[in-house]
Image: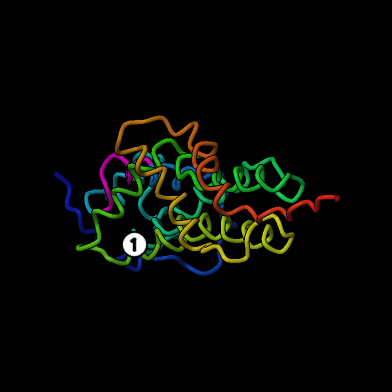
Amino acid sequence: MASAREPEPTAETAPKPGGRPRDAALDEAIILATRERLVRDGYSLMTIGDIAADAHVSRPTLYRRWRTKFELVVDALDYGFRKQRNSYTVDLTGLAPREAFTEAVRRLDPAYFNPDAMVLMGNFAGEAIRTPELLGILREHAVEPRVALVEDVLSRLQESGAVSAEIDKHTIATLCFGSYFAAFYRGESRAGIPEAVVSVLWPAIAAAKPARSRRG
């Protein structure tokens, strides 16, 4: 079995200034190979040699782009979130309040773009003792941007008067995010989560409508 520890880049493999422009297609091939290895092997067992072989590049080619496995994984995780974000086609500002909240909850789904995302995130959590920095990467690149979107939508709905000013946006967003993990561990489909979650939460967070005055 290959060692989980990668050697430090040498003078031959370390990035060099200048040279030809980077090939975006080659960069993407390496990133995709990294993401697949993360799912299959996890961070500790994944090696630069395996990634290079999967991407059909040499180790020096990879090291000219990323000095360490850690740096490569940071970009691989960010790649997935950016792809998910770019796949959204609905403008939340043009939706009715409840629909905007439902769409924001839909975008919380870690597997919205990558069906292996739950396994990938589980692997990162499993490295909490060996490589605790990975949890920081997970929070920065995969968790906070999603949760912040829900909080931002709720803030906008508060400003418009559609949602109560008294709600705890942080807790609501956290609960919505956790619903995807609960469905994963219970072996349930995630397809109906946004509508189901909003159907429970919306009556509790929607601003009360003013009572109609009665004519005598």
Q: Please give the name of the residue rendered at 35% of the width and 61% of the height, measured from the top-left corner.
A: 70
Q: Is residue 82 above or below residue 144?
A: above
Residue 40 falls inside the magenta stretch: yes
Judge whether residue 93 can be spotted in this image: yes
Q: Is residue 27 above or below residue 196?
A: below
Residue 197 falls inside the magenta stretch: no
Q: Secondary structure at mark 1?
A: helix
In this view, the residue in front, 50 or 110, is 110
Judge whether residue 113 can be spotted in this image: no
Where is residue 135 shown, x and y percent of the image? 34, 62
The amino acid sitting under disc 1 is Leu
Looking at the image, which residue sits at the far left? Answer: 1
Q: Is residue 70 above or below residue 120?
A: below
In this view, the residue in front, 27 or 214, is 214
Q: Please give the name of the residue rendered at 27% of the width and 47% of the height, measured from the top-left corner.
A: 42
Q: Which residues are magenta?
A: 36-43
Quarter of the image for the N terminus: give it: top left
In the rendered image, which quarter is residue 13 located in?
Answer: bottom left
Where is residue 138 shown, x and y percent of the image? 39, 58
In this view, the residue in front, 203 or 154, is 203
Looking at the image, which residue sits at the far front? Answer: 216
Where is residue 52 shown, x and y percent of the image? 36, 46
> In the drawing, does residue 24 fall left or right of residue 129?
right
In this view, the residue in front, 32 or 146, is 146
Q: Which residue is mark 1?
A: 135
Q: Please give the name of the residue rendered at 72% of the width and 59% of the height, measured from the top-left corner.
A: 161
In the rendered image, which quarter is residue 129 located in?
Answer: bottom left
